[in-house]
Image (cartoon, rainbow, N blue to C red):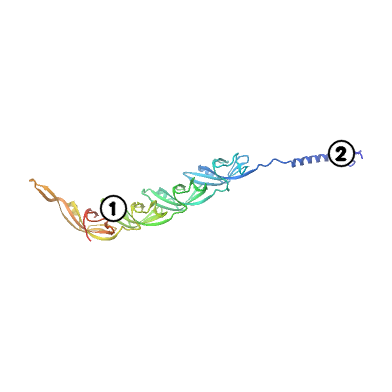
Amino acid sequence: MELLDDDGNLFGVVNVVDALVVLLVLAVVAAGAAFVLQPGPEEPDVGTTHVTLDLGTQPDYLVSAINEGDTHNAGGESRLTITDVYLTPQGDQTQVIVRAQLRGLASGESIDYADAPPRLGRALDIATSTYQVSGRIRAVGGNDSLTTEQTTVVLSDTMSAANADEVTQGDQIRLAGRTVATVEDVAAYATNNPTQRRVIVEANLTTHHQLGERRFGGAPVQRGQTVTLPADEYTFNGRIDRVGTGLERGSADVLIEDVVDVETAERIREGDVSSVAGYETATVESVTTYATRNPDRKRVAVGLSLSTLTHGERERFGGTPIQRGNAITADFGNYELGGAIERLDALEPRGTVTERTVTLQMYEVRDVMADAILPGMAERSGGEAIAEITGVETEPSLIVTTGDDGSVNVVDHPYNRKVTITADLRVRQTTSGLTFKGESIRQGSEVVIDLGTITVRATVVSVGG
């Protein structure tokens, strides 16, 4: 058979031109198949890990801009994505800690991020379209969230009276729209400075774990540390007194003594309530007023029922332990008491009230003053007589003179008098003897009696049975 016939057909069947077309198509298909089946370049082996970044303290405008989902492209396969944000106040600024996912080339059991492994202490940049910050790696591995928990602490601070009035149960401390602490309970007390208050709060802090310890505001949450809580109306810089428990309230009865001016002594009444920043702290249960050597000052013995806080095994009033000898301050609005605790678990002075008739003597008293002391005059406390004059005898004081002839004579003083007073005193019988106005009374001791128009300072000659 001829390869081509007269019509140009191959083997008398297929036209030569058609055959060439078919061969061309087959060649193209074969070449394409070879190209498609040829192995392409290998995909890079990438991995991810999570890190905790401490961004330090940042200004408010940056704090508000940092959010979950923010990303940073560090080049190549390296990419950072913020997955969690933790804010705490630190002084007058805000500390920012973020949890971030790092994506990078796999390298053994870790990755290379921006050409290096994510090691502890390494500084990383975060640059977005709105901000740029830098932080150091504090932890590597784990999940996409920071480990946080609510920690109850008791904090104490001394504040201005105006700011103390603003501290309220339920106050929330918020930073960039995030609640970082809540005030759960409040107690407030007067101080020896009338413009300041001692404020004690129970607060729940959102703390985070770092190196096995709870932290807030860049510091471990432990006794003695200072915590800043910036509320809208005030800033509370409190020292941590206890961790894990809140305020434990109690009460205590005490007797205090203080020396006050006459006007203050007259204002003190049973039933008076001390209220500080809206919180009741003390109630007057009894009051006894005594004269002093200074006619413008009075000594008061006041029985108080106190609202206390338990600290360990000890009751405290503000920051002062309730124990004999410690001074406490209570503000009753129109007067303030700041005396030392004389008795615990008692509202009255020590001993049983009784009456005694005493004989008193005064020497070298001017005649005008001696004549002013009259039977029936009395010193009163709470409307009751605590000392009443029942008898008065006066006689001239004696003086020794020398005559012109050298003789020695004993004569009456022209105007000085010796005064003998008989008085009924309300005293207390104690195990150590009798007391008058809280002071021991016996032969030879001195007593002071305020008779209103005159103050008597006399020596005890005898005490009746």
Q: At label 1, which amino acid type do we have?
A: Lys
**SS category of the residue bearing label 2:** helix
* SS label for mark 1: strand
Which one is in front, 340 or 190?
340
Amino acid under disc 2? Val
Q: Compute the Cα span from label 2 to label 1.
A: 138 Å
Relative placement, left or right, of 306 versus 424 is right
Q: Is residue 95 visible?
A: yes
Tell whether 362 sits left or right of 42: left
The percent position of residue 183, horizontal first and vertical second, equals: 46, 52
Q: Which numbered disc covers residue 298?
A: 1
Residue with the most extreme front position: 108
Residue 303 pos. (x, y %): 33, 57
Which residue matches tag 2? 16
- Which of the 4 image quarters holds residue 34? top right
- Residue 250 vs 44, above or below: the answer is below
Picture coordinates of residue 124 (x, y %)? Answer: 56, 40
Q: Quadrant of the N terminus?
A: top right
Is 291 left or right of 28, judged from the image as shown?
left
Front residue of 208 and 187: 208
